Image: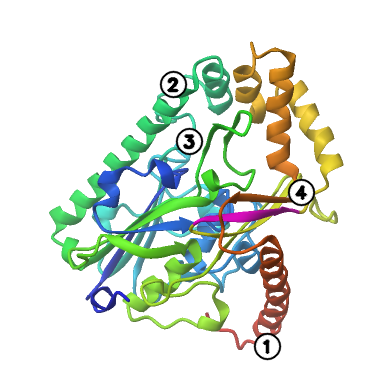
Amino acid sequence: MYDSINDLKIENVMIFVSDSLRWDYTPSRVKKMGLTFKTIASSLYTSSSFPSIFTGMYPPRHGVFTWEDKLLPWNRGILDVAGYDISLRCETTWTSMGPEDSQIHSSCGNPPGTPLSEMKEPFIYIEDDKGGHCPYGFDFSEYDGDCPDFFEEYGKKPRRELVEKYERGVKKSVENFEKRLKTLEDRGIKGNTLVIFTSDHGELLGEYGGLIGHGRPACPELVYVPTVFIHPGIKCKRSEGFMRHVDLYPTIMELLAEKVEIGLLDGVNVLKKTPKTGLSFREGGFKKSDGIKRKFDYKGHSVWDQDGGFVLHKHGKSIFLGLYLYKIMKKHPEFIYMINSLKGNGVSGKFNGYREGFKHLTDPKIRYDEPNFDVEKAKSIIDNYLKDSQKLNEKLRIRKSIGKLKI
């Protein structure tokens, strides 16, 4: 489908992840830079999305759902490509730590965080940029407070001010991205470097009764993100379909003429094959303790195509209702924007807002927009994937135990 792109001579790869950037707020100036795909995020949270980008696997297969989980040493995907200088850099995120000391680093085996200017060719450079992450429009060190303070303040203002600050944050991220492009140009390596601009998940800006942030619920605003392939040899600026996070790893490896074991991957080379559907998994909540099975306060599995999707919630409605009301009554940071934004709406307005939020967080089956499949097909896709993953994970465990696993 994109034969000229598949034939590009590429030595280096730069992946710039603009955190929390949703598809419908992607600046046109970025889309015009290259081949743009509407992308299905593998998760709604950084901890599980980044491993999917790295490995070409969905969370049930790579095993990382929360910051307590770790990628297995033999399954770090793009972070372990032999012969390449590898960097995972965090300059504008995790600013209280060093650029290679974030939770992303610890959950992915502590890859180095070398600056782009110091990378040795051939290289694979990945950067997590603040993007549209809260507090919107401010650097982490610039705002006198943190995300709860920010949402409490902007919950008292018109929603357009929240959106304007989000757009300001996205604009800053694009400026950071353009600085990286300038670094490639200054080094004289822009012509042999494949640049990929993407995001780990989207962001809610007060939709569904006043929900904000990310992590939950599964919905278009969090699932759909951009991916743009940029290279002087890419003349086509439009795609004919969509892609998934899990397609990045196999696509990059094939462009680099590197072999991977395709049978282990959930993704495909999107420049040769267009997927029909994509999955997104979010399981998050209570922390694990030794000897105690992990419990989740939100468990949402979903299936999407470029026109919409179905979300199947796996957590109990009654249990979640108690937690939901408790957090609202206690003015939990997760709901502080909703609480403040619904003030002045009267009893019935507040009730309707809280009910709307609860619906999107808990309804067992929710359809968004107009997907080209029905809910039974969505359920079948998820059930079959989870069964296949369980079987594959057992095979991998056996192969690893007898020393015959190479990935």
Frontmost of labels 3 and 4 is 4
Residue indicated by mark 4: 296
Q: Which element carries disc 2, helix, strand or loop?
A: helix
Q: Foreground residue, 258 or 201?
A: 201
Q: Given the image, on which type of amino acid does mark 3 rest?
A: Ser
Decide which of tag 3 and tag 4 comes sooner along the chain: 3
Residue extent of the magenta highlight: 307-313
Task: Quadrant for the N terminus, please.
Answer: bottom left
Decide which of tag 3 and tag 2 comes sooner along the chain: 3
Residue indicated by mark 3: 96
Q: Given the image, on which type of amino acid does mark 2 rest?
A: Glu
Residue indicated by mark 2: 161
Frontmost of labels 4 and 1 is 4
| Residue 130: % across, % down | 42, 40
Q: CA distance from mark 3 to mark 2?
A: 27 Å
Decide which of tag 4 and tag 1 comes sooner along the chain: 4
Query: Label 2 crowding class (10 Å Cα cut-off): few <14, some 14-19, many 20+?
Result: few
Q: In terms of image quadrants, where is residue 333? A: top right
Q: Is residue 311 magenta?
A: yes
Q: Which element carries disc 4, helix, strand or loop?
A: loop
Instruction: Indicate which disc residue 402 carries.
Output: 1
Q: CA distance from mark 4 to mark 1?
A: 33 Å
Frontmost of labels 2 and 4 is 2
